[in-house]
Amino acid sequence: MTSPTASAFRGNDKLLFGIILGVLAFWLFAQTTLNISPAIAADLQVDPSVMNIAVSITALFSGIFIVVFGGLADRLGRVRVVIWGFLFSAAGSILVAAAPRGMLAVPLLMLGRILQGVSAACIMPASLALLKAYWDGAARQRAVSLWSMGSWGGSGFAALFGGIMTETVGWRYIFVGSAVASLTGLLIVRGTPESKAATDREYSFDTKGMLTFTVAMLALQILTVQGSDLGWGNPITLTLGVIVVVFGFMFFRIEASARNPFVDFKLFRNPTFNGATLSNLLLNGVAGMLIVSMMLLQTGGQLSAQQAGMLTLGYAIAIIAFIRVGEKLLKRFGARKPMIWGSLIVGLSIALLMPTNLLLGAYKVLAVVSYTLFGVGLAFYATPSTDAALSNLPDDQAGSGSGIYKMASSLGASFGVAISAAIFTALSGSAGSTHWLSGVLTFAGRHDNVAVRRAAMVALGFNLLMVAAAILAIMNTVPNQRGQTKLMH
């Protein structure tokens, strides 16, 4: 439901530009931590394991709250929730930029990163719902493509942008820029006629569902990041595991009987929405490939953040250049084929990064090709996947359904990064655990970094398995042509 004055805003590029600024505040600015985390940790004198939590906690809180704010956007207003997102982003970015060394470093860093995650939880589903409300047909596909350029393209430029900023003016200015972009987007979006879901259903917030989900996800995140350091038989680790299982079970029981569930499981009755959402979770999890390869190049190859980031230039260019190709493939072939093709190309890009036994010069060449293919693959996948999910949502659940879809993005990125970093950190500190690789492969060049190189190979292999799972999900759920399935109620 939109206001009577909304017709003037249909297909409005100024509104779209404001929305994209909000998307960039997360994917371009906040996601730079995937590359510059060693620099931040060194400057603030923060332990690397704590820094790993700071990197992944933003996507975690985005994933936890994205469905909440998607549902609120449907009922309170999508423009209002987008504006909340801009305010959270500006506040969180300022806190990160202002984090000092010493006792306040970790609290301010964590709080700022959490607020950045909550901002994404506001902006992502509400902005997608606005695309559905203010754009139709081919115009919507164009708007989704441009929105995807902000999200996928922003993440493509994040490593390069972060490296250059860190080496030239300092990492803090990245987050100053994020605050400026957020406030600019807020000014542009203000005045847009409100859009809400046309529903007469009485709404009550599912507090129990959200709290049980939050506890389960936080415990799982800490378990993932700290489990290896604490020891898998440690009482704390075992307690965290029990919390995950118990609260996860409680969450599913609560949602099954809730009148207005935190996660509406009826949305998953449609296989196309399922395939788009599950594969989206898995392919976003492949962001772990970036943090592993960036840490490998910096810790094992002694490259600076800027030098490592420069290798990702092809990724950034490819995703911008090819994302409209994904839109054209969607129009010609439907969603299934370009989603599979994109996933296969992503898998190839990871396979090219796995020969960590090569000399640095040869590996850098493979990295350039790999990152470029990574961008092409995600560009092919992005618009067909997003359109497949959105096209299968009823109007009164556009916000909450978009929230679930973007929750998959955020949780996938959070846990993909956390698990990949945990595998890499754990194995790189224990040469014996990957000794079997030396019996299979000969590692050329320096041998003081072999443990790091072997650890990266295993962590990248985990990312390759996620791509394989994404392809299976698409093949078993997404039909050959769009529109062959209808959402069931």
Image: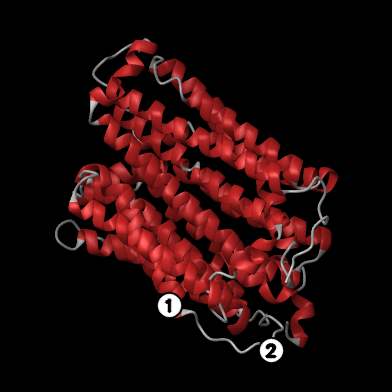
Front residue of 302 and 392: 392
Q: Quadrant of the N terminus?
A: bottom right
Disc 1 element: helix
The image quarter in which residue 123 lies: bottom right
Front residue of 255 and 106: 255
Pointers 2 and 1 in contact (CB under 8 A)? no
Measured as percent of width and height from the top left, residue 437 is found at: 35, 17
> Does 153 sit left or right of 455 as displayed?
right
Precedes in sequence: disc 2 or disc 1: 2
> Does 38 sit left or right of 362 as displayed?
left
Q: Which residue is mark 1?
A: 208
Q: Residue at x 43, y 52 (%)?
A: 414
- Dot 1: within a 10 Å radius of its alpha carbon, few (fewer than 14), some, or many (20 or more) residues? some
Measured as percent of width and height from the top left, residue 21 is found at: 56, 62
Question: Which kind of residue does numbered mark 1 sit on?
Answer: Lys
Disc 2 element: loop
Say above or below: 281 vs 87: above
Measured as percent of width and height from the top left, residue 31 is found at: 44, 51
Measured as percent of width and height from the top left, residue 323 is found at: 69, 45
> Does 61 sit left or right of 131 as displayed?
left
Check residue 200 in the rendering and tell me which mark sits there, or answer none: 2
Q: Quadrant of the C terminus?
A: bottom right
